[in-house]
Amino acid sequence: CPGEAVPRCVKLLSVDPANYPDAPREGIRRVLEAATGVPHPRGERLNSSRIEWIRMGTTVATNALLERDGARTALLVSKGFADVLHIGSQARPDIFDLRVRCPGVLYEAVVEVDERVVLAKSEPPGEESAARRGLRRVRGETGEQVLIEREPDLDALRGKLAALRASGVEAVAVVLMHAYTYRQHEEAVAALAREVGFAQVTTSSSTLPMVKLVPRGYTATADAYLTPHIKAYLASFVAGFDDDISKVEISFMQSDGGLAPADSFCGFRAVLSGPAGGYIGYAKTAHTPGGPPVIGFDMGGTSTDVSRYAGSVEQVFEARLAGVTIQAPQLDIKTVAAGGGSRFFFREGRLAVGPQSVRAHPGPVCYRKGGQLATTDANLLLGRIRPEHFPRIFGPD
């Protein structure tokens, strides 16, 4: 707040529908009331005239990926490559493991698009030229020459997309061969998908215009799978403010530690949004210039994030989270699907933990809100948690 030397801090449950619809907005409301002395009633749209900017991080995408709770998604891929993302790169993280587990995919259906673009190469002597075969030669965005063997059959594709939409699929990822240099086919298919009624359409050429089809496809499907959740969260957050919120600069933390305007914040760049905020926070407050490196251990409700800061931000350009490989600049954070809200199960006579979470609402049993057994309950019973160190926000009193 202007004129105050110490920032105001508010601790809230991330989900508490009995008391407020949105935790970040409720935190803003309480700070405004305390700083201005002007009442901001909880049931009314929040007056945003005194707000200059809002900067946030969120674990919406992280949790959706860990719990496989994203949008129902379909993959549109060049004909003949329906299984390309399921086959993947065939990399084996543990080369001596005799039980190789094939990673799952984020899409539930595949539609093959009858189209074909190939790179133009020098034609061997005696082979019929591309011109004589009636193939159109064009210059791609990378300067490479490509041959258009088949334009997309949009009429045949329309019926398939309509059937997908009628089945409840919400999002599609369009991943076509050589779209990194010739994106026109992807754009034509994407336009048809939007016309059919898909609200979320991601093209690999706009998400990650790189040569390799598999990583480009992984990243595009992750974006299609996660972005609808991001958009729904943003709409819910903004809906609680008055019309002046359009004048407020709203930024969200991206996986690379930078800020992005709310209208360009998307799924594949939001996977580590929440953990990235923690990384930047401890890097600024816990590390002494010239001192030893600092280890960050950020345990939340669904995941635990571990990172290291030694004076400069460490980034990677490919990361694997919950079995999904995403190629995008990201802070070097290792995430596992185990947190304070990881749910306990009895499976085959043994106690198992996660990856499902009891979430902040109703939360673990010790929240006294009718929740289910979770890691936090075990730590409380073992004496590892000191209740007196927690804010008084649990239970009826």
Image: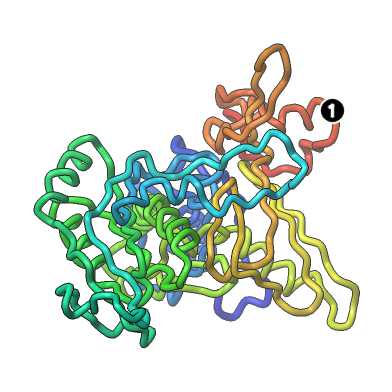
Does residue 272 appear left or right of residue 38 in this picture?
right
Residue count near mark 1 (Cα–Cα under 10 Å), binned few <14, some 14–19, many ≥20:
few
Total number of numbered labels? 1
- Residue type at mark 1 is Leu
Q: Position of residue 23 (x, y in %)?
A: 49, 50
Q: Relative to 375, does residue 310 appear above or below in the rendering? A: below
Task: Determine the residue positioned at 18% across, 44% down.
Answer: 160
Q: Position of residue 330 (x, y in %)?
A: 60, 67
Task: Determine the residue positioned at 51% across, 40% down.
Answer: 104
274, 100: nearer the viewer: 100
Regarding residue 40, the answer to whether it shows in the image is no
Give residue 288's quadrant in the image.
Answer: bottom right
Give residue 180's quadrant in the image.
Answer: bottom left
Looking at the image, the residue that sits furthest to the bottom is: 143
30, 167: nearer the viewer: 167
Looking at the image, the residue that sits furthest to the front is: 126
Image quadrant in which the C terminus is located: top right
Which residue bears the numbered disc 1?
382
Image quadrant in which the N terminus is located: bottom right
Q: Position of residue 243 (x, y in %)?
A: 26, 66
Does residue 361 appear left or right of residue 190 in this picture?
right
Q: Relative to 20, does residue 175 appear above or below in the rendering? A: below
Looking at the image, the residue that sits furthest to the left is: 155
How are the residues colored?
A: rainbow
Task: Determine the residue positioned at 55% across, 79% down.
Answer: 2
Looking at the image, the residue that sits furthest to the top is: 349
